[in-house]
Image (cartoon, rainbow, N blue to C red):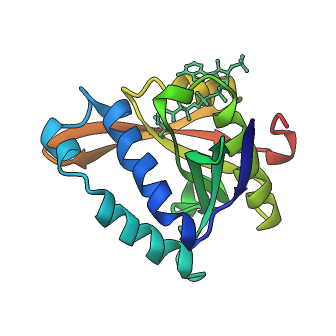
Amino acid sequence: MITIRKAGTEDAAAIAVVHVEAWREAYRGIVPDDFLKNLSIQRRTDQWVNMLSDERNIYHRAFVAEMNGQVVGFSNFGLAREVDLGFSGELFAIYILQAVHKQGVGRLLVGAAVRGLRELGCSSMLVWVLKDNPARGFYERLGGEYVTEKNIEIGEAKLLEVAYGWKELDKFPA
Ligand SMILES: CC(C)(COP(=O)(O)OP(=O)(O)OC[C@H]1O[C@@H](n2cnc3c(N)ncnc32)[C@H](O)[C@@H]1OP(=O)(O)O)[C@@H](O)C(=O)NCCC(=O)NCCS
């Protein structure tokens, strides 16, 4: 059974484990190996404690997905960072352990983030995804539409990121 609930600082360590594991699983061959090797669960835990404990931090809102009492994924959302793109809300991150992909966890975590954004007064949502990431297919399946793309650097790698958008969150598939 999958449970979705709001994340608190007590979840920081579990979220950090998923964050680091999911990065290594999803970005092998896309992000440089050295960068992935140097990811630290302790550093991520500290970052998540800081983010989740400070309501002024734009990254403080998150949901976790639990299966059999274990955190297997999370979504992180808030007011959009680049308002000039015309979207008021943003899905900053969604990461799920590979072992439980394609079981509906992603859809539930995005759905929770959409409800959270609507409570914040957001009527639309944007997400950035690496162009080489197969997760693009997930956003397309959920009705996201191509908005734009930009260059980013992760470690030594120069990569492209694509933005997908949902213009009307009230029409987001429940
Ligand atoms: C992308 C991700 C969040 C999807 O989560 P998930 O739990 O596997 O997705 P769901 O099972 O809820 O899938 C919902 C729908 O999307 C489809 N889908 C999921 N991943 C897909 C993909 N990579 N390509 C195409 N469709 C996909 C599913 O088949 C399902 O379709 P259906 O409703 O017709 O059955 C997950 O694969 C993940 O965490 N990936 C690694 C981290 C990552 O890349 N995050 C995004 C960073 S921007």
Pick whichever, 92 or 109, lies toward us: 109
Q: Residue at x 25, y 52 (%)?
A: 39
Q: Is residue 150 visible?
A: no
Q: Is residue 125 above or below residue 104?
A: below
Q: The C terminus lies in which quarter of the figure?
A: top right
Q: Residue at x 24, y 36 (%)?
A: 31
Furthest residue in direction front, as rendered: 68
The answer to whether 130 appears left or right of 119 in the picture is left
The image quadrant in which ligand 1 is located: top right
Residue 122: x and y, percent? 75, 60
Q: Residue at x 80, y 59 (%)?
A: 118
- Report how many numbered discs are placed on residues in the image: 0
Residue 5: x and y, percent? 72, 56
Pick whichever, 109 or 79, lies toward us: 109
Quarter of the image for residue 160 reads top left
Residue 25: x and y, percent? 35, 32
Pick whichever, 142 or 111, lies toward us: 111
Q: Is residue 14 above or below residue 73?
A: below
Q: The N terminus lies in which quarter of the figure?
A: top right
Pick whichever, 3 or 161, lies toward us: 3
